[in-house]
Every structure is written in C-alpha cells, then in structure tokens.
Amino acid sequence: MKRSKRSAIDRRQTIDAYVCISPWLIGFLIFTIMPISFTIYYSFTRWTIMEPPVWIGLKNYIFMFTKDPIFWQSLKVTSLYVVMSLPIIIIFGLLLALLLNLKIRGMNLYRTLFYIPAVISGVSVAMLWTWLLQPDVGMVNTLLDLVGIKGPGWFWDPVWALPSVASMSVWKVGGSAVIYLAGLQNIPPQLYEAARIDGAGRRQAFFKITIPLLTPTLFFQLIIQMIECFKVFTEAFVITKGGPLKATYFYLLYFYEEGFQHFNTGYASALILVLVTVIMGMTVFVNYTSKRWVYYAGEDRAS
Amino acid sequence: MSNQRKCHKMQRWQMAIAFALVFLFAVSFAFAAGQQENQAAGAEETVTLEWWTWDSEEYDEASQRAMAKVFEETHPDIKINMILMPVSGFETKMTTALGSGVGGPDVTFFSIANWYPKALPLDDLIERDNFDTSIYYDAFWKTKTQFDGKTIGLPLGVGAQFIMYNKDLFDEAGVAYPEDDWTTADYLEIARKVANPDKKIWGCEILKRPFRAIWFNHGEDVRLYSPDSKVVEGYLNSPGSQQAYEWFYDLMRSGATPSVSDMETLSSENTGPVDLFMAGRLGMATLNQGHMLNAVKEGMNFGVVREPGLEGGERYVNAWSLMVSIWEGSENPDESWEFLKWYVGPEGQKFLMDNANLFPSIGSVAKQYKDADKDYVQGFLKVLEDTNVAIWRGTHPSGSKVESGIKDLWDKIQLNLISRSDIKAELDALVPAAQLTLEEAKKTLGK
Amino acid sequence: MSIPLKGQNKGISPVFNKRITVNIKHVIKTLFIHLCMILIAFFFLVPILWMLSTALKLRWEIFAWPPEWLPREPHWENFREAFKRVPMWGYMWNTLRIIFFKVIGELFAVPLVAYAFARFRFPGKKVLFLLVISTMMIPLQTKLIPLFSMYVRFGLIDSYWPLILPAFTGTPFFIFLMVQYIKTMPRDLDDAARIDGLNNYGILYRILIPLCVPALTITVTYTFLWTWNEFLQPLIYLNSYEKYTIQLGLEMFKGMWSVEWNLLMAATLSTMLPVLVLYFFAQKKLIGGIATLGLKG
C-alpha cells in the first residue's frame, strides 16, 4: 500500500520533470543531437566538405593515435594550458568577488570597472596583450628593465609562449567573479552572526562558512571554466598562430585548421569527438568527487 | 488533498498547452516565412539573383551598388540582391553554404581552390553566346579560371605583389632606387643600408611563408613538391630550396629587418607589413595594388619595382585575378550567366574602374585607366608585363597542409635556433613527414 | 545588517575609548580597501585607455616608434567617421531586438528546466544532466553545416529566428548555473509551501524564482553580452545588410588589404557602452538570494 503510493508520487514527479525539461529536450534533439550525429558519421569518413564523404571506418582514429604527432602535441599543450589557466580563473575570480562583495561606497562603479575586460571581445584584447608583452618596447619588459631584469620574449619564445597565453586569463576573472558574487548572496548572514557569537575569527568563518556554502558555485565554476579552457582558441589564433615551434598549438586551433583550412573535415570531426570525450571524462570525474566536497543546502535527503 | 491535486493537474495541463502554443507559433511562423518567399518568387516575372560580395579598396560598397543598378536598368527582367559581407567572414559563410548544398549565392568569388568543384562549368554557355574570352590577359585566363579541364569562372581585375620602396628613406640613407634587374643579394644589401636601428627604421620586412616571388625566383626546383603533386624529395630539399632558406637565414641575421615580435605587434592581422610601411618605418615592403592605392591616398613618396631574382635567372611575379563563378546549385544559371558576363565583362569592369579603383583584367579596358600616366601605375603595368604568373604553391590544394608541416623550420630560423650549415640537414629531415602528409592529403582531396 | 567579511573587530567592546580606536581602524581599513580597488581598477582599465588612445590617433600614427601611449592630437572625428562608415545605430538596434527575445526565451526555459534537475527525482536524470553539460563542449563550428541546411529548408535564413529560437530551449550554461543555485535553497522552503497548498509550479514561480534573482540577473547580463559579441551565427544566418548585428558591423572596418584600427577601436568603444550601462544597473540586482530571507523573516 505504502509502496504503491510512493510509486504514484514518483510517477507524478517523473511526468512533471519531463514536462519541465521538455524545452531543453526538444532543443537538445534539434540543435545538438541532429548536428552531432552528422559529426559522428563524418568522423568515420574522408570528407572535404565539397565532395561526398567516403566511408573509411576507424582509419581517422587509428591515424590520430598512431601516426599523428601533432595530435599529441596539441593535446599536451592544451592540457598544460588548462592546468595553468584554470587555477588563475578559479582563485583570482573568488578573491575578486570577495573584494567586490564588501559594502563600501562606490562599489557599483568598481564592479562595473572590473567587468570591462570581460566585455571586450577577443581580438582587441589580443592586440593589447601583444603590445603589453612586446619584448623590446612593451610595457611589461620596460618595467622589468627598471628593476634590472631582462624580460623574456613572451609570445615569441618557445618556453614562455604558453605561460604568456595562460596569463591572459587574468582578464577573464571579472566574468567569473560575477558568478561567485551571485553565489555569495546565497549564504545566510545569520550564519556569520552565529559564528561571531561563538567566537569564531574571520578566517575561521571564511573556511567554515563561506567556502563550504560556496561549493556549489565552485563546482559550477570548475566545470564551466574547465570546458572553456579546453576550448581555448582566439588567443592563439590571433597572436601566436600556434607557434613558436607549436608551443601554443591548441587543440581547437588544430581542429580549425584541419577542418576549415585544409578541408580535412572528416578527420577534424574525429578530432573534436575525441576532445568532447576527454572533457566528458573529466566532467564525470569531477562530478564523482563532488559528492565528497560539494554541499547543497537543498540536497534531496531521500536519496 | 484531492482539491489540491486537481489544481496541480490543471496547472500541469496549462503548462503543457503553453509549450505547445509556443512551439506551434514558432514553427508556423517558420513555414509562413518560407512560403512568403516562395510566393514572392512565383508572383513576379523577374528573377532575383543573389550576389555575394565584399567591400575592398578596389571596389567599394557604393560603386558596386551603383553597378548593380546599371545592370538592372539594362536587364529589366533580372534583379540583383547584393549581399555585402565582412571580408573576414566570407570564407566561413561560403564553406558552410557550399557544404550544405543549399542556401548558396548565385554569383560570387570562388577564391579558394577547394571550392572549385562546386562552381558551374561555363564552357557551354561561353560557346552558346560566342563570348570572347580572348579579351582577358592571357596569363590570368590560363591560370585563374581553369579547373579540371573546364572553365569555371571569369577573372575580375588583376592584382600583383611587388616591392614598394619609400623614396624618402632611400634618399635619407643615400641609397640608389632599385632597378628591375636587381638580385636577391642586392635586396639584402639595400635593406642593410636603408635600415637605421637607432630610429627603429628597417630595410625590409621578414618573410612569413614561402610563397613570394623572391622565394620562387631562387630556381625551378624551389617548391614544396613536384609540379604533378607526387614527390617531395628533390623539391623541398633541392639545392634551390636550400639556397632560398640560406638567403632567408641571412635576411634574419642581417639586422635590417624588424624582429619577429616587432612584425607581429606592429603589423595588423593578416595584412602584412603595410602598417609599418605606411608609418614610414620600412624602407621596402612587398605589397600589392590595394596597398598602393592607400599609399597614394596618404600622399606617400614611393616607387614600385618587381621582386628580385638570381643573376640571369627566370623572374616570376605573384599575380592573381579574383575568379567570379556561378554556384552549381543556382536555380537561375542562365540569368546568373547574363549577370556574370556583364559584371566581369568589359562593361562591369570598366564601371568599377571608373567609379572605384579596380584594375581590370581586360587589356583594352585597362588602357583607359584614369591615372595611366602616373609612374606608380606605369610601375604596376611593368610588373604585369612579366607574364610568368607563377603558381608555385603546386596545383594541389594540399599545399597548405604540407606547408604547415615545415612551419617549425621557419620558427627555428627566425628564432636563431639553428646555424646556417644545419639548413640542408633540416630540410632533408622534413621530407618523409611532408611526403606522408602529401599522400594523406591526396587521399582526402583526390587526384 | 552587519557586514561579516569586512568584519568589525572580534567581540564588541563596551568601553567607549576603545570604540574610537575601532572607528579609526575602520577608517584606515576603508581607505586601504579603496586604494586597493583603485589600483586594481587601473589594471583593468588599461585596455579601455589603450583603446581610447588608439581610437583618437591617425591611422598610421598607431605604428609610430617609440610607441606613443597618447595621441599627438586627439582626433575625435574618428568616432563620427566610424558611425558614418557603417550604420552602427541600426546594428545596435537590431542586436537589441534579438537580445530582447532571447532574454524572454531564457527566462521562460531556464528556470523550468533547472527546477526539474534540482528538485525532482526521475529516471534518466543523471545522464540527461551530463548531456546538458556536455553540449557546452561542442564547438559551434562542428554544428554549422547541418544547422544551416535545416534553417534553409525551413526558410528561416535572413531572419532572426535562427538566432532567437535556441534561447527558448534554454542555454546549458544558464541551466547549470540555475540548478546549482536552486540546489542551495533549503528544501524546507518547498515543504512549507507545499503545506500551504502550492503545487510544483507554484513553488517554482512563487517561492524559488524570487530568490533566484542573482542567478537570473547573470542570465540576462550574459545573454546580453554574448549576443552583443556574437559573430559567427549572425554571419551565417543573416544576408541583408540592414539586418546585420553589431559584430558584423565592426568586422566591416577590416578591409581586404588593411585594417582601419583607429575607426575599429572607436566603433568598438562606442558599442561597449550599452553593455557597461546595463551591467552597472544589473549588478545591483546581484544582491538578494537566500540572504534576503533573513531580513524578511
């Protein structure tokens, strides 16, 4: 008796849930499943976009894993970029958000100012960075000169190119800070109040209240920014063209050149599916660990 | 409880209906829009052609619109829908449309070799109308409109790369102006003399890729692979190639050029050294007629000379004509042909020459060029007389793929990571990978 | 309301003169914060200043040496010239119209979808949610050709529909954001509302949405920003010059053989203003959420 009632509730919930997600589901079928099934098909073919595709089975994938050093190079470079760039965005974004969450006069203005770099689209920012990091006359090396350090060649040095591109992420923290800012609003102030009465210091409050209650936002940031980092493209496309010596030959750059410049589009389809699989694997992994460190106030207690 | 459930149920139905309505609305709107278009097309007698184009120094937006209007007046049954798009987006949009097989233009530039299979062959139409193709400069006709034994387009205008030199900087350094028979060694010598590192004035720019005439002039065998697109060995690593790379090595070490980072920072995206030249900081720069027009507009004191070669060697010019074609999917090929032969024929090219800055690909029209007596035009004409219009990238579209494979060597020379004597060995080492790339690319791209 | 992070001193002292020290300390702290803010703000302002300087220069002055951080003489007419060259006003208006419908679409779809993922138990939930996230991984370029073919067949090319319709199915980024946001809301809220006789939709629209204002604000501002900066899709789907959007207009300054950087920067700067103005007002709405409950209750 109890069981059947439970299942009736479940059924009703299921129906409601599917009604609710139906807009996304329809969009997913039309805007993702439909095009991506073409991509999956093309990945098993030779295809130049212009001529009809020719079925070649797994050859694209076999070539990629056994004969293509550029594939491995771009995967390596991209992973290194993620490792360098992700912490910058996650940590600096949080610090900036904490700063912007202070209640002082003129905060509206500050918040807007800090948002500016996020507003400017790729090419202008790239152009600016080439000027800032220009080895001979750029602002950064001029400043380094003043303190007696000979600055490196930045984008034009095989060793420094990748860190230089990664450091451009600093400008993106404005965008990531906004999301933290929204997350911070979900922390009930009473908790701090209570902590203070219990004699907890600010540092303790930060680590015992702010961070745990912010974990859902952190989790979101981690996944989203990881995906974005894997998709790094514009910086390399505009500034370094993947060089020098393929030090910044990112995965999407390789995909783009294969697919749209060399018209090796079947292979490019295979490339992108491998990347999606890699990111998906990372996401599942992060999601798996999340059970240990992400705290939801509204967790479904029944499950 | 039951009451509550009822209310709950009703709301669920309301939600479902709301969804249904939204999507019905969207879908019906979609169909209505589609039908409207069909009706509009069916109701009138005239045919509307879609013409994709861009705005450039040689034919700006206004003159192209005016030209379309003139055509419509003389051809009352054809309407031209001119679609102007940013140059930077044209390639993506074309590739998408051609790849989709639907939604492409009737008439447009087929500027990329990979698109050629999708252009309508014109031989039958040319024959039917007795269209005189001998009006076009022969070299451009032969190299720029033929594919797979068929004529697939008509050549609009001509362009060429040549060296523009800043007369003021030459005078300041006391260097004589270059002559047409100069050599690649002269080029280095002059560049060194004109350069003034203290003022950050340089003799010439650095090369970014191996496709300039100055490169090819090093010999017949200076190619990425054989003319029949089969072998890399003996071309990529030929004595001529080695000589060209060594020359490039000398250029990079000469101190006459800006550093790689200077070039990247100070010249804008994909447009080469034009900005540095226009800012008066480059003695010589390899530019084209579009840049020349800008320099004229800015009142620069400059001269024009063709690219140097070897003593007594064959000289080439990197020249082009933009092929305009009809998309094979066009629903109105006859009307498109009417437009194409007018637009790229004497009338259209003359209109764009008179009202804009097009340099026509038709000799008889070019003679009437408004500034024909100016010395820069004379210089340009002289460059075009070299009918050795080279296609040294090979006839195969896989060229770009093979080329990207040798990019590391360019980086190494630019960054001074290898010595001059290593060049031969480096070239030899690149051959197997390049051969593999060529073969793989040929499997995909055919032939 | 107290400001926990800025934190007055540990423990409140009843002693009067100790309070004065606290106040002086407070003033110094505030000053210090302002100083930090101004320094960081300057760092973030560099791109704008540099763009402004470029926008005011003559075309080839930009490439002079030694590099000049200020124009020799400000050429404000570059702004007028930029607007004359390309119909930027019209393009801004077009883009605003697209944004309007997209915002409606997102506000309709995102909370609903997110609500289901955050609160309901249903078969396939975990897989479907992974799919929501994974759609973000696929670059647009891979999907262009099939989508373009589809829109051509439906006769939607050269209309705004291909740009707007996907918003009505919810953008995965916002769905994910909203799911995370709703999940932090205590379930007690739902339970209390259910006892009051609200059904699932009532809970969403009466209880949760008002608390989700910060997340919704992000949805609106990001939709605005992304649509404003979108280049590829308008390029592919729009044909008529009159229907173009901002980014297509900006690309028009990049010529066949050279780029007019000064005009491009002038136009870019001008088109950035609306985004910043919107954000200036929107960020006030970033306050709210569960934190406000304490005040009400």
Image (spheres, rainbow, N blue to C red):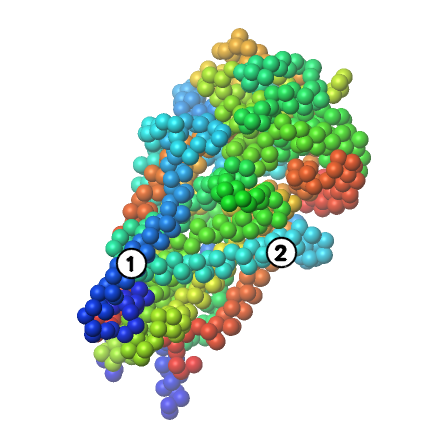
Helix, strand or loop at label 1? It is helix
Foreground of the two, C71 or C22? C22
Question: B122 or A120, which is in the foreground?
Answer: A120
Q: Mark 2: few, some, or many residues within 10 Å (few <14, many ≥20)?
A: some
Residue at coordinates 19% horizontally, 70% vertically from top-left?
A: C16
Task: Please tell me which residue lies in front, A96 or A179.
Answer: A96
- The chain letter under disc 2 is A
Tell me whether circle 2 and circle 1 mark residues in contact (CB < 8 Å).
no
Residue A76 is marked as 2
- Residue at the extreme left of the image, as rendered: C16
x and y percentages locating residue B313 in the rendered image: 76, 19
Q: Is B145 placed left or right of C88 in the picture? A: right
Q: Residue at x 49, y 34 (%)?
A: B87
Instruction: Give the residue at mark 1.
Output: C28
The answer to whether residue B4 shows anywhere in this view is: no
Is residue B12 depicted above or below B206 in this figure?
below
**Secondary structure of the residue carrying numbered label 2:** helix
Residue A39 picture quarter: bottom right
Q: Could you classify mark 1 by the number of other residues whose Cα lies within 10 Å: few (under 14), some (14-19), or many (20 or more)? A: few
Q: Which residue is drawn at 31% across and 54% down?
A: C34
Chain letter for the residue marked with disc 1 in the picture:
C
Cα–Cα span, label 2 and label 1 = 48 Å
**Residue B60, horizontal then vertical, whole percent:** 44, 25
Q: Which mark is residue A156?
A: none
Whether B112 is drawn above or below A228: the answer is: above
- Left/right placement of residue C235 relative to residue A181 reads right
The image position of residue B363, as x and y in percent, is 58, 13
- Image quadrant in which the N terminus of chain A is located: bottom left
Q: Is residue A233 visible?
A: yes
Q: Which residue lies furthest to the bottom in this view?
A: A1
Residues at marks 2 and 1 on the same chain: no
Q: Look at label 2 and name its amino acid.
A: Lys
